[in-house]
Image (spheres, rainbow, N blue to C red):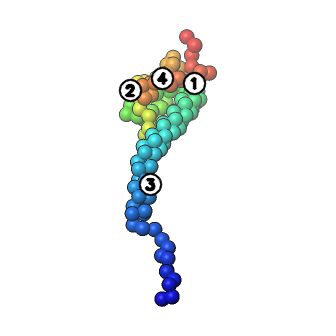
Amino acid sequence: MLGFKVKQVGFTLIEILIVLVIIILVSALVAPNLLNTYEKQKKSQEIKQLNTVLIYAAKKSIEWQGLDGNVLNNRITLKNAMLPSEAISYKFNYIEFEETQFFYNKRGFTKSTYLVVNDTQVAFPRSLSATD
């Protein structure tokens, strides 16, 4: 050769391993927070869905001349008070309920004020619950 050196371009195995270790460490720190955020988002979404179901129950009770509600095993079942075989059921995957029952009269009012969801109270829609 005439004194020219060929310079090899690329990364060494050690450099690649260090980068991989850094990526794994950062992933291990970030992943639990992302999963926790995802769970919170799903719970929040289901609480909004629960509020929609309660508003629907109040409206359906007018049509059905009364409505019996039952909460059991993360499922809400709405039954026609006049025809109990006619029922609608909603399952929730991310929120947990205390077992309870509630009733809407034929005008869409209930004496129940809240459901306990994940150890917190979720109020029945204010404009549709009885004040007494």
Which one is closest to the eye, mark 4 or mark 1? 4
What amino acid type is highlighted by mark number 3? Answer: Ile
Confirm whether residue 99 shows in the render: yes
What amino acid type is highlighted by mark number 2? Answer: Glu
What amino acid type is highlighted by mark number 4? Answer: Gln
What label does residue 125 carry, if any? 1
Which one is closest to the eye, mark 3 or mark 2? 3
Q: Position of residue 18 (x, y in %)?
A: 41, 58
Q: Which residue is mark 3?
A: 23
Could you tell me which residue is drawn at 44 percent across and 49 percent down?
26
**How many C-alpha atoms fall within 10 Å of the one at disc 2: few (<14), some, or many (≥20)?**
some
Look at the numbered discs 4 and 3 and tell me whether their residues touch, using CB distance below 8 Å. no
Q: How far is the residue under mark 2 from the one under mark 4? A: 13 Å
Look at the numbered discs 2 and 4 and tell me whether their residues touch, using CB distance below 8 Å. no
The relative height of residue 80 versus residue 17 in the rendered view (above or below) is above
Closer to us: 101 or 22: 22
3 or 2: tag closer to the N-terminus: 3
Could you tell me which residue is drawn at 62 percent across and 21 percent down?
127
User: SS class of the residue under badge 2?
Assistant: loop
Which one is closest to the eye, mark 4 or mark 3? 3
The relative height of residue 122 versus residue 16 in the rendered view (above or below) is above
